[in-house]
């Protein structure tokens, strides 16, 4: 019997989204004729981003909180269940045909959306800087292993080179990133499997933490894990799922995305935790450059350390491309009159400046923990409001109305393009998240700002309070307004032959 060839849609893309060419599309509507992707294609892109050294480092930092290995493993599994949020927050793109913050105009109004889009833009910049810090850190270890002692000039050169290289994938666009990230899955699975082979016999999985780990610290670790997994990507999902056809299966979309993220991240973060117990010291893993843990150790052969770091740098560029792509289209959603690739160039310049500050003035572990705290405050209530609004609209949008930014749009908002109901719900949700946030050690927060954490002995419920309170506040405040819009929305869809 002749073999049946399964056609790969990425090899037959429409002219508007070819790999290794500059994608012309930005926040505007993607016509059905250019919706080339399948749920498994989006999942393979996310899988390529998940088999990543960042998550390896997260697993190491997590066990560095003081947890035992089994406690860390439970945090990794439970925290990564949040990838269901990414799946749910990717279901709007096929219907709306635009990016997350093109869709977000429905809930917040085109002008109110600018405020939330600004928060997201800062978040994407923060993740990009995180990736650049790790790229520079891995490069410095490689230079050191070559026999040189890099100083400040070397750091400057490495930052400039890293910024120049990381522009390439997001500059070219969506199809290029899907293709490249998918290609990186197999080699990285092999690389990480070899690391496990070297470290497994040297791991101290039964070692107990230095001090008793209470449930309050466990909740801090859970908030850290949830934010750096599904919750931290939820604001990017529709930037890529908008290339799915309108009739793409919702179950398949959520299922594929969850499988393509949860499984590899649990494995990679667990490997990071195992490696923490076998390689280097806690001070090195939690220091300014976690890759220094691979210097002066004998568990992993020096030659393979070089291979591992080279591959790590390559993959870090890949995951940074997702952040830069999303930050570029977010800038457009804010109203910046820039083409998508021009926004990428602007972002790169700003990231370069922030990275200079971070590399010379900050500790990576401290930077990451403080950054996570800031992300939780806005993103937890926002994702709940976003999903509640979608549900209240009966899981439908009028794509043409989302593209309008004036009073003729049904999504224009109650007052001059501002939907104050959503904005007030966002503010209430942010206050609720802050009230239950456990700030990193060294970051002083007045007790009146996080009373739930203070009265619970230091536990962190910020993700849950932010989502529940923000979502309920919008449900109460926005119900009548959205209910009035639904019949108009349905009529417009019928007129367009879509309903």
Image: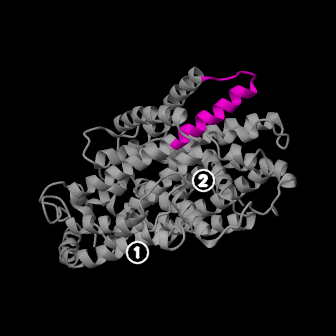
Above or below 236: residue 469: below
Label the magenta part by its dominant secondary structure.
Answer: helix
The image quadrant of residue 115 is bottom left
Residue nearest the viewer, comparing 180 with 284: 284
**Colour scheme employed for the rendering of this structure:** one colour
Q: Indicate the position of residue 194 as horizontal and vertical percent values.
A: 80, 47
Q: Any mark on residue 50, and which?
A: 2
Residues in magenta, as a range: 130-151
Residue drawn at (73%, 41%), measured in percent from left and top? 293
User: Is 397 left or right of 227, judged from the image as shown?
Assistant: left
Q: Which residue is mark 1?
A: 468
Residue nearest the viewer, comparing 421 with 481: 421
| Quadrant position of the C terminus in the picture | bottom left
At numbered mark 2, what does the secondary structure look like: helix, strand or loop? helix
Residue drawn at (72%, 56%), measured in percent from left and top? 273
Residue drawn at (21%, 55%), measured in percent from left and top? 111
User: Is 213 left or right of 441, judged from the image as shown?
Assistant: right
Magenta span includes 146: yes
Category of crowding for the residue at label 1, using alpha-carbon neighbours closer than 10 angstroms: few (below 14), some (14–19), many (at least 20) = some
At numbered mark 1, what does the secondary structure look like: helix, strand or loop? helix
Magenta span includes 472: no
The image quadrant of residue 406 is bottom left
């Amino acid at each position: 019997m002749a073999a049946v060839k399964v056609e790969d849609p990425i090899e037959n893309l429409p002219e508007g989204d070819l790999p290794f060419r500059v994608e012309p599309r930005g926040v505007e509507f993607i016509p059905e004729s250019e919706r080339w992707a399948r749920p498994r294609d989006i999942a393979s892109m996310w899988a390529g981003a998940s088999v990543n050294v960042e998550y390896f480092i997260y697993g190491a930092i997590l066990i560095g909180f003081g947890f035992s290995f089994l406690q860390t493993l439970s945090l990794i599994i439970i925290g990564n269940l949040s990838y269901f949020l990414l799946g749910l927050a990717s279901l709007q793109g096929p219907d709306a045909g635009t990016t997350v913050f093109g869709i977000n105009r429905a809930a917040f109004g085109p002008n109110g959306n600018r405020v939330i889009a600004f928060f997201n833009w800062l978040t994407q910049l923060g993740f990009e800087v995180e990736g650049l810090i790790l790229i520079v850190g891995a490069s410095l270890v490689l230079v050191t292993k070559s026999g040189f002692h890099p100083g400040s000039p070397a750091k400057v050169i490495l930052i400039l080179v890293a910024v120049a290289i990381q522009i390439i994938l997001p500059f070219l666009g969506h199809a290029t990133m899907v293709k490249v990230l998918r290609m990186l899955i197999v080699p990285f699975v092999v690389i990480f499997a070899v690391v496990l082979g070297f470290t497994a016999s040297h791991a101290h999985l039964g070692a107990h933490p230095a001090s008793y780990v209470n449930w309050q610290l466990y909740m801090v670790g859970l908030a850290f894990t949830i934010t750096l997994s599904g919750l931290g990507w939820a604001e990017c999902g529709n930037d890529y799922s908008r290339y799915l056809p309108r009739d793409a299966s919702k179950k398949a979309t959520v299922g594929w995305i969850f499988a393509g993220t949860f499984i590899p991240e649990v494995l990679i973060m667990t490997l990071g935790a195992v490696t923490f117990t076998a390689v280097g010291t806690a001070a090195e893993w939690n220091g300014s450059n976690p890759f220094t843990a691979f210097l002066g150790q004998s568990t992993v052969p020096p030659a393979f350390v070089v291979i591992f770091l080279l591959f790590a740098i390559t993959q870090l560029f890949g995951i940074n491309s997702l952040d830069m792509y999303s930050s570029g289209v977010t800038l457009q959603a804010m109203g910046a009159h820039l083409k998508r690739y021009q926004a990428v160039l602007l972002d790169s310049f700003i990231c370069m400046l922030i990275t200079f500050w971070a590399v010379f003035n900050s500790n990576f572990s401290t930077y990451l923990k403080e950054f996570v705290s800031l992300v939780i405050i806005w993103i937890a209530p926002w994702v709940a409001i976003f999903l509640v609004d979608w549900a209240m609209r009966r899981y439908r949008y009028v794509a043409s109305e989302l593209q309008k930014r004036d009073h003729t749009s049904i999504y224009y908002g109650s007052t001059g393009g501002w939907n104050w109901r959503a904005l007030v719900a966002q503010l209430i949700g942010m206050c609720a998240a802050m009230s239950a946030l456990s700030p990193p050690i060294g970051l002083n927060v007045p007790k009146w700002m996080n009373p739930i954490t203070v009265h619970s002995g230091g536990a962190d419920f910020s993700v849950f309070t932010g989502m529940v309170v923000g979502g309920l506040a919008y449900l109460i405040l926005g119900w009548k307004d959205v209910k009035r819009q639904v019949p108009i929305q349905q009529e417009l869809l019928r007129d367009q032959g879509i309903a």
